[in-house]
Image (spheres, rainbow, N blue to C red):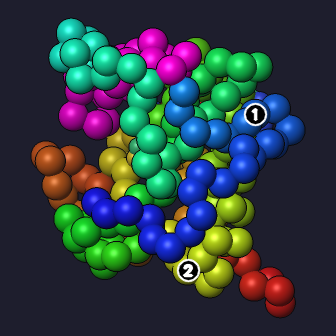
Amino acid sequence: MTELGSVAWPPAPIKTERLVLREPEARDRAAAIELMASPEVGTYLGGPQPRDELERAMPGAPSRRPGRFIVDLDGAMIGQITLYRETGHLRQAAGRAELGYLFLPEAWGCGYAAEACGAALDWFADAFPSEQVVLATQTANVRSMRLAAKLGFTEVERYEAYGAEQWFGMWSPATPSD
Ligand SMILES: CC(C)(COP(=O)(O)OP(=O)(O)OC[C@H]1O[C@@H](n2cnc3c(N)ncnc32)[C@H](O)[C@@H]1OP(=O)(O)O)[C@@H](O)C(=O)NCCC(=O)NCCS
């Protein structure tokens, strides 16, 4: 993956009805480790990462990089959204921004992911007018498939990778005539 491209970063925090999308801060460290170490979060992502390795690799605040948003509910991190440019491991994706989302299990089932991803896509559409965004997810990841559809991603293709069926979708910003 490469950096997002020519855009002022970080943007001002993005506020939605219930959430704030912002840069990582030192207070997010425990939640960021929990996110990567959670077996539930890792179910369709190759499994959880060892907690001790994560502790060692993240001595301070989670890393800041263009395209990475921490999702904050009432001052605490509940997930993260990424919009990174793909360098080509996905078909038809090279150079395009790919949406990724990871939320702590206790924050599932509340509509937070949809609310935060919608705001991130709105931000992206302003920053990179008329650019499409891609998304890849396992078809067995039912929550992720539902979220992708809700956000307006449409299927481009399905393919086998990592021993499972993958879904590759694309999102286009709304045009004034839509
Ligand atoms: C994928 C993931 C982000 C989806 O989270 P989610 O909470 O199911 O997604 P949404 O924000 O769309 O929430 C939808 C649910 O919130 C419910 N909900 C409750 N209040 C709501 C509200 N005010 N507005 C909208 N939905 C609401 C919906 O009814 C729905 O519930 P259901 O799943 O029981 O039908 C989450 O499962 C996750 O982090 N998984 C692990 C990481 C992962 O696999 N990522 C994919 C990488 S490709």
Residue 96 shows in this picture: yes
Q: In the shown orientation, is residue 97 left or right of residue 71?
A: left
Q: Is residue 46 magenta?
A: yes
Percent coordinates x, y for residue 121 in the rendering: 64, 60
Q: Which residue is drawn at 59% across and 23% down?
A: 77
Q: Provide the secondary structure element on which disc 2 rests.
A: loop
Q: Distance between the residues labelled 1 and 2?
A: 25 Å
- The C terminus appears in which quarter of the rendering? bottom right
Label 2 belongs to which residue? 131
Q: Which of 36 and 46 is in front in this view?
A: 36
Dot 1 or dot 2, earlier in sequence: 1
- Please give the count of numbered marks on the rendered protein: 2
Q: Residue at x 40, y 36 (%)?
A: 63
Q: Provide the secondary structure element on which disc 1 rests.
A: loop
Label 1 belongs to which residue? 19
Q: Which residue is drawn at 28% across and 60% down?
A: 1
| Ligand 1 picture quarter | top right
Give amino acid for label 1.
Leu
Residue 151 shows in this picture: no
Q: Is residue 84 magenta?
A: no
